[in-house]
Image (cartoon, rainbow, N blue to C red):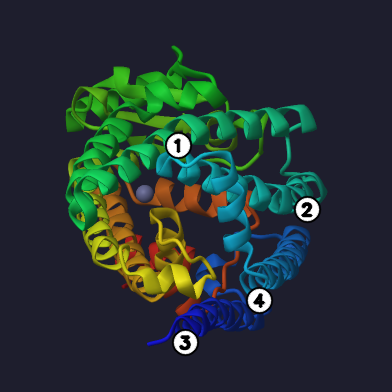
């Protein structure tokens, strides 16, 4: 193996994963105009159906343009020895490997953020705006960005510094120490996400008194779920799209309902969605997901540990002095086939869990209101009712509306 060969393997991986994504997108686009399955005929009226067709097409075109642009920039950066340039720049500031690594990734991330921000701005204020979803303002948009940046600097920077330090101390067995830190971090984040991170971006309040609360209380009592764990979040300040999710475990477990969900659905339908979320908890999905992701992190770090000290990866990127941060970049690209497989398996598991949570809601509450709510939520977010099966297998974390409908109706 020569450094040049490794370089072209890296380029090959970038191009192949782009091509696979484009093929999948094209397959999906070809099915945009498929007839709507009869069971879902009542989701759209004629006008909203036309709107949903437009929305899908505009988004598909936008996504192809964005990823093509990013591909060209990425390849240009690789061919122009961009990483060597940034590495030199960082080394001119400090000779401390931790500081060099932090500056290196800092520059790479600022650069990629400058490139991607116009796209996300356009997505929010032109596309989402045009279809009536956007509620955000430029001030809120940039404030979110700023907060995101501060979090990345503090949390991401802190973790990176720690990992490079482990690497300096213990060489390729650094992965074990890094894994312990990441595992503890994952558990803490999972537990306290709602208390630590969400308040930076949203207001959340306990569900207020009223007939909805009474209905939820009655349901919660039948399955032994504590009501003080149900919160309402002001999602409406950014988008009209509705959502609900479960987070945390133990005493920190909670269900978060978007205010948009409460506005869009009838009370019975909201209880059904809530029952679905309780299902995720009762079926231990939260813990299983956490354990799986910790194991997967361990595997990735272990693999990184056996790659990182090989100088050939640094040389492939035109850098003579091997370092943790350059090795990490090469590894990141070469890992894509594996992350493709693990991503596929994780979304398979996730779709399985969605069926289980739906079944739980059906068994402990009722199937019909859940079907009605899923249909309404699909209409209000203009979702695609006819995605390509392969696209679903690789990209969908939830089964399609039709699959969930059939499952809830016992039609499998
Ligand atoms: Zn779910």
Distance of mark 3 from mark 4, alpha carbons? 41 Å
- Residue 5 disc label: 3
**Label 1 vs label 4: CA separation?**
42 Å
User: Based on the displayed image, in which of its 4 quarters is residue 311 positioned?
Assistant: bottom left
Name the residue carrying label 1.
Answer: 157
Tell me how many marks there are: 4
Q: CA distance from mark 2 to mark 4?
A: 18 Å
Q: Quadrant of the C terminus?
A: bottom left
Dot 1: within a 10 Å radius of its alpha carbon, few (fewer than 14), some, or many (20 or more) residues?
many
Q: Mark 3 or mark 4: which comes first in sequence? A: 3
Q: Earlier in the sequence, mark 1 or mark 4?
A: 4
Q: Is residue 398 visible?
A: no
Q: Residue at coordinates 37% horizontally, 87% vertically from top-left?
A: 1
Q: Element at badge 1?
A: helix
Mark-to-mark CA distance, 2 and 3: 42 Å
Image-based side of 344 in relation to 188, left or right:
right
Q: Which residue is mark 2?
A: 127
Viewer-proximal residue among 313 and 277: 313
Badge 2: residue crowd in 10 Å (few <14, some 14–19, many ≥20):
some
Say the numbered circle drawn on residue 32: 4
Check disc 2 and report its element: helix, strand or loop.
helix
Task: Compare marks 2 and 1 and give the one earlier in the sequence.
Answer: 2
Quarter-wise, where is residue 379 in the image? bottom right
Which of discs 1 and 4 lies nearer the camera? The answer is 1
Nearest the camera: 188 or 161?
161
Q: Is the C-beta of the residue carrying label 4 under 8 Å from the nearest atom of ligand 1?
A: no
> Which image quadrant is residue 286 in?
top left
Residue 293 in the image, given as x and y percentages of width and height = 26, 52
Name, please, the residue furthest toward the top.
209
């Amino acid at each position: 193996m020569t450094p040049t060969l490794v370089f072209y393997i890296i380029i090959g991986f970038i191009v192949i994963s782009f091509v696979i994504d484009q093929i999948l997108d094209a397959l999906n686009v070809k099915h945009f105009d498929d007839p709507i399955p009869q069971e879902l005929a009542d989701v759209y009226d004629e006008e909203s159906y036309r709107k949903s067709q437009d929305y899908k097409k505009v988004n598909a075109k936008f996504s192809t343009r964005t990823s093509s642009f990013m591909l060209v920039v990425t390849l240009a950066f690789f061919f122009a020895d961009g990483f060597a340039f940034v590495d030199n720049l960082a080394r001119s500031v400090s000779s401390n490997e931790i500081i060099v690594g932090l500056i290196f990734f800092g520059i790479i991330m600022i650069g990629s953020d400058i490139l991607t921000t116009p796209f996300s701005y356009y997505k929010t204020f032109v596309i989402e705006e045009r279809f009536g979803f956007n509620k955000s303002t430029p001030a809120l948009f940039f404030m979110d960005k700023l907060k995101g940046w501060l979090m990345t600097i503090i949390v991401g920077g802190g973790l990176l510094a720690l990992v490079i330090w482990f690497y300096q101390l213990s060489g390729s067995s650094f992965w074990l120490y890094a894994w312990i830190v990441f595992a503890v971090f994952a558990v803490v984040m999972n537990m306290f996400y709602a208390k630590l991170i969400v308040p930076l971006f949203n207001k959340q309040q306990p569900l207020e008194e009223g007939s909805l609360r009474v209905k939820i209380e009655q349901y919660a009592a039948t399955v032994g779920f504590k009501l003080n764990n149900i919160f309402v979040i002001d999602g409406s300040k950014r988008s009209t799209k509705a959502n609900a999710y479960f987070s945390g475990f133990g005493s920190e477990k909670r269900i978060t309902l978007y205010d948009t969900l409460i506005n869009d659905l009838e009370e019975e339908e909201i209880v059904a969605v809530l029952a679905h979320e309780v299902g995720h908890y009762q079926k231990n999905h939260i813990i299983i997901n956490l354990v799986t992701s910790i194991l997967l992190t361990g595997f990735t770090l272990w693999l990184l540990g056996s790659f990182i000290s090989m100088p050939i990866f640094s040389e492939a990127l035109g850098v003579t002095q091997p370092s943790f941060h350059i090795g990490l970049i090469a590894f990141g690209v070469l890992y894509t086939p594996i992350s493709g497989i693990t991503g596929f398996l994780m979304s398979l598991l996730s779709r399985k869990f969605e069926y289980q949570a739906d079944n739980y809601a059906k068994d402990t509450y009722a199937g019909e209101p859940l079907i009605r709510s899923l249909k309404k939520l699909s209409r209000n977010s203009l979702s695609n009712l006819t995605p390509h099966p392969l696209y679903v297998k690789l990209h969908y974390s939830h089964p399609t509306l039709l699959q969930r409908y059939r499952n809830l109706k016992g039609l499998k």
